[in-house]
Image (tube, rainbow, N blue to C red):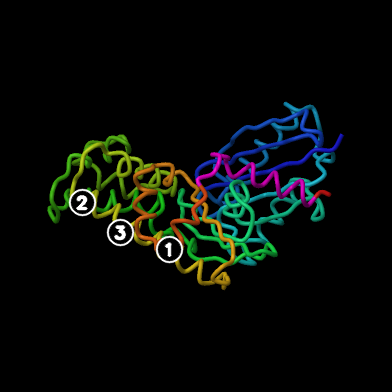
Amino acid sequence: MNYYLSVDGGGTKTDFLLESEDRSVSVRLQSGAASIKSVGEDAVRQNISAGLNALWQRAGIQLEQVRHAVFGMSGCDCAQDEARLHKLLQSLGWKPEQYTLCNDAVLGFYAAADPPGLVLIAGTGSIVLGVDARGAVTRSGGWGYGFSDQGSGYWLGCRALEQALLYCDGCGPYAPWFEEVARALNTPLDQLPQTATALEGCDEVASLAALVLNWPEAEPLREEILTQGAAHLARLIRAGHQKLHLAPDAPFRLVFAGGCLRNTAYAARVENNLPEPLRAARVRGNGSAPVFGGMRLARKAGI
């Protein structure tokens, strides 16, 4: 029996879905991050390999039985990235004709809608991809954690750390949630500067976004961070819509995805920055994870 595989490789975790052709077998599991720009190539190889080996063992199959796979990978941003990831996948035994490689945002769109439309993903990073009626992809944002990806989990985490460090330096006001920032990094607040200098992984910083998103009380610094982040994500959407060059009466769908946008208040802030036609285009969706969008693409490619 033939099988299809979808892999959603994010900056924090990797989601795997394996299905038999007749859907009688379905195995889903997770492993660690699969963004080269987040954790490095060696960790990506290890996490992808571990997830695949666990799939083969659970389903009782071998790689050769996979008719087609789709790897949606965070950090797959340019030809150089694609070349590195193709080399990595082929080192794990994949033949070029056996899989499709794309940015992970593509999976998020197809999990909720059909073209034409846009997907905004705000997870560890942020990006807007447009998919036209022919399936061609345009892009805005997501060019790198340090200088792009505004409004993302990493960006929110950086802003949280930035404000807490300004307080520690005597350059900014105190906010109660600074204590939680320090606690999340297993250090007292007065030792936060020394701890921050040793931070290495983007996922460590991105994990601080939850404190900004979920803090139960209104607080000026937090409000400012969320307002700026939402405004930037809305700008990405508007830019992505222009790049699609759609006729005024063309059907259009807007998909929100990623961990930050599962916070309904943050998603509402983004939506409130959009003009009415874009708000009306938003697909509320069925809650399907991006990995299910990859499965749709894998089955289509394997026909």
* Highlighted magenta segment, given as a residue range: 284-301
Check disc 2 and report its element: helix, strand or loop.
helix
Using the image as rendered, state which of residue 5 and residue 56 is in the foreground.
5
- Could you give the CA–CA distance between mark 2 and mark 3, rounded to whole angstroms? 11 Å
Q: Which mark is residue 148?
A: 1
Name the front one of labels 2 and 1: 2
235 lies left or right of 1: left
Q: Is residue 161 above or below residue 250?
A: above
Check disc 1 and report its element: helix, strand or loop.
loop
Q: Quadrant of residue 51?
A: top right
Marked residue nearer the N-terminal end (2 or 3): 2
Q: Residue at x 47, y 61 (%)?
A: 144
Tag 2 near tag 3, CB within 8 Å: no
Image quadrant containing the N terminus: top right
Q: Residues within 10 Å of mark 1 (few under 14, many from 20)?
A: some
Q: Which mark is residue 228?
A: 3
Q: Quadrant of residue 137?
A: bottom right
Q: Which residue is mark 2?
A: 221
Residue 211 image offset from top left, x and y in percent: 31, 40
Residue 105 image offset from top left, x and y in percent: 57, 54
Tag 3 near tag 1, CB within 8 Å: no
- Could you give the CA–CA distance between mark 3 and mark 1, rounded to whole angstroms? 14 Å
Marked residue nearer the N-terminal end (2 or 1): 1
Residue 77 image offset from top left, x and y in percent: 58, 62
Marked residue nearer the N-terminal end (3 or 1): 1
Tag 2 near tag 1, CB within 8 Å: no
Q: What's the residue type where badge 1 is placed?
A: Ser
Check disc 3 and report its element: helix, strand or loop.
helix
